[in-house]
Image: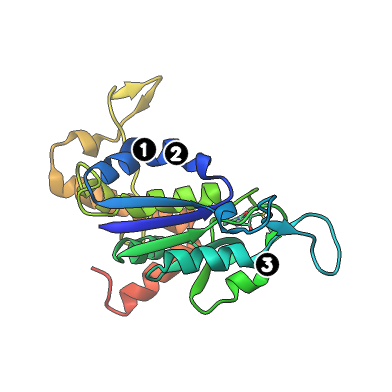
Amino acid sequence: MLRINVVTLFPELFEAPLRTSILGRAAEKGLVAYRVVDLRDHTHDRHRTVDDYPFGGGAGMVLKPEPFFEALEALAPQPPVALLSARGAPFRHDDAVRYSVGEELTLLCGHYKDVDARVGARDDIEEIALGDAVLSGGEFAALCIIDAVVRLLPGALGDFESAAGDSFYDGLLSPPSYTRPRTYRGLAVPDVLLSGDHAAIDAWRREQAKRLTRERRPDLWARYEAERSDGTET
Ligand SMILES: C[S@@+](CC[C@H](N)C(=O)[O-])C[C@H]1O[C@@H](n2cnc3c(N)ncnc32)[C@H](O)[C@@H]1O
């Protein structure tokens, strides 16, 4: 069972998402257990202060290091511990896989102007970013990461094949999907998908996955080609 800890100023943001759909069912099945920790529980003053003015001046408040350090001491988690940060390494499918195979994952959510840099500088903390855009807080990024990780746990999805066919799983974007009706407003489903020829359908999907990746994600395509020339592609 994977234990996921989240340290946040806003525990209430996690209540419904962690109870709902795949995340909730995975917990009910005992595949994952969530522990959401209120950063303010690791303060010692009457006002439960978590932030302070930035040294050197400037707008906005900075989250203090002590509550994060003390929350981690109380949790004593197994690695990995990740601080959500726009400056972090981009979160990728490989990270979701790496997190999903561990025993424990701890996510630290920042808020306001920033988190004191001594948190992310710890050797036992990695900084991870969700996209090249700044969010108001790490909570929604943490929820996205939890969702990406939990759906990879064996048994979390009704049909594990549906994760295996998803984008990034084999280094490519997923091919397009269609359902009924066969023709809608003059837009027809590709004939091959109606042919019943499974080998032809697999080949078409593979070609579409390659085409989409080449056109839309040259970065992924270059990596895929490099791995294929190394002989690591299936
Ligand atoms: C307003 S942001 C701080 C942004 C910071 N001043 C900067 O420019 O990098 C507050 C918090 O939201 C979270 N956050 C913002 N953007 C993020 C992103 N792209 N990925 C992950 N976390 C993010 C981080 O925890 C961050 O400490």
**Residue that carries the numbered disc 1 in the rendered image:** 19
Could you tell which of marks 1 and 3 lies nearer the N-terminus?
1
Amino acid type, callout 1:
Arg
Left or right for 177, reference 11: left
**Residue that carries the numbered disc 2 in the rendered image:** 15
Toward the viewer: 200 or 166? 166
Could you tell which of marks 2 and 3 lies nearer the N-terminus?
2
Q: Who's the residue at 36% across and 35% down the image?
A: 20
Image disc number at residue 91: none
Judge whether 16 appears above or below 221 on screen.
above
Residue 115: image x %, image y %? 66, 62
**Residue that carries the numbered disc 3 in the rendered image:** 116
Secondary structure, mark 1, is helix
Q: CA distance from mark 1 to mark 3?
A: 31 Å
Secondary structure, mark 3, is loop
Toward the viewer: 230 or 115? 115
Mark 1, Cα crowd under 10 Å, few <14 / some 14-19 / many 20+, is: some
User: Does the Cβ of the disc 2 residue fall within 8 Å of ligand 1?
Assistant: no
Judge whether 121 appears above or below 142 on screen.
below
Mark 2, Cα crowd under 10 Å, few <14 / some 14-19 / many 20+, is: few
Toward the viewer: 105 or 172? 105
Q: CA distance from mark 2 to mark 3?
A: 27 Å
User: Does the Cβ of the disc 3 residue fall within 8 Å of ligand 1?
Assistant: no
Secondary structure, mark 2, is helix
